[in-house]
Amino acid sequence: MELVAAAKLRRAQLRIEAMRPYADRMLELMAQTARASSSLRGLSLLERREERTVGILTITADRGLAGAFNAQILRRGFALARELEAEGKTVSWLVTGKKGRSTLNFRRKPVAGEWVDFTDRPAYADAQAIAHRLTELYEAQDLDRVIVVYNAYVSPLVQRVTVRDLLPIPDEVLAQGEQEEQSTLRGDTIFEPEPEEILARLLPTYLETELYRALLESAASEHGARMTAMRNASKNAGELIDRLTLAMNRARQAEITQEILEVVAGADALTA
């Protein structure tokens, strides 16, 4: 399992590296289009309203044997839910992965959406399915805010729990994209059709892209955590075997010594 996880981890790293330039370019286009738009009103994914119901999307794995990978996501999600409920807000759960789904069902938490059977190798279509469901809930005002909790990949030994706002799309996203856009784009741009219409199409794509990035980060983190966990398990198993072998040899030697003493004692009794 350690070798398999290492091979999958390498492929997951390559997918993340290939995806990052696309995500950065998406931010640049959104910033440029938003700057050229005369008004951002009417864009539902940018609409802000009073927060009554908050959705928490936890990205977990379909399988275990990955150390604290799943536990730390759920622990952070439950802590966040307690903070929101203390503020008088209702929490609605969304989850990817069988481990997270089983934990939420066991605790009888309301689940507004669940997606399984792809966490170790997510596809863009999986991110689209999640994004469509989140958009549907947000536009129907069933959710007033959506937060994603996932493991960001740092290294095979380190996975950082990350909490990000997905909906409404934060203003900081456009500001960040504008800074990057100013350093890379030059000249005037002619928009056809109008910038508002283009931005209305870009926002759902941005949401899908961010979810896809989170799924890829989580997949790489899962493989890294599993590789590390299996390496530690193999090491611990080897140490346990050594201890048990030593204990067995001591017990066998003690039994042999006892038999020799019994033979010697029997011989002494006969000669006496």
Image: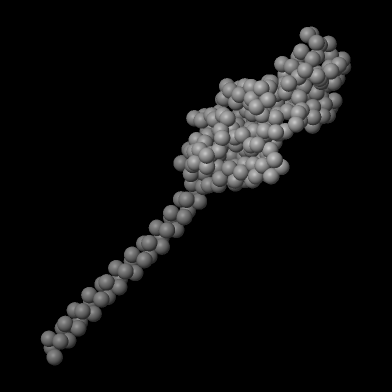
Q: Residue at x 29, y 68 (%)?
A: 252
Compared to 65, does 37 lie above or below? above
63 relative to 253 in the view: left or right? right
Q: Nearer the viewer, residue 88 or 136?
A: 88
Q: Position of residue 101 (x, y in %)?
A: 52, 36
Q: Residue at x 61, y 34 (%)?
A: 92
Q: Quadrant of residue 256?
A: bottom left
What colouring does the structure picture have?
Answer: one colour
Q: Position of residue 224 (x, y in %)?
A: 56, 41
Q: Nearer the viewer, residue 122 or 71?
A: 71
Compared to 186, does 66 lie above or below? below
- Report how many numbered discs are placed on residues in the image: 0
| Residue 226 visible (yes or no) | no
Q: Quadrant of residue 20?
A: top right
Q: Position of residue 253 (x, y in %)?
A: 30, 71
Q: Nearer the viewer, residue 59 or 147?
A: 147
Compared to 87, does 165 lie above or below? above
Direction bottom: furthest residue: 272
Q: Residue at x 73, y 21 (%)?
A: 44
| Residue 195 visible (yes or no) | yes
Q: Position of residue 202 (x, y in %)?
A: 72, 19
Q: Residue at x 46, y 50 (%)?
A: 234
Q: Quadrant of residue 84?
A: top right
Compared to 34, does 218 lie above or below? below
262 relative to 235 in the view: left or right? left
Direction left: furthest residue: 270
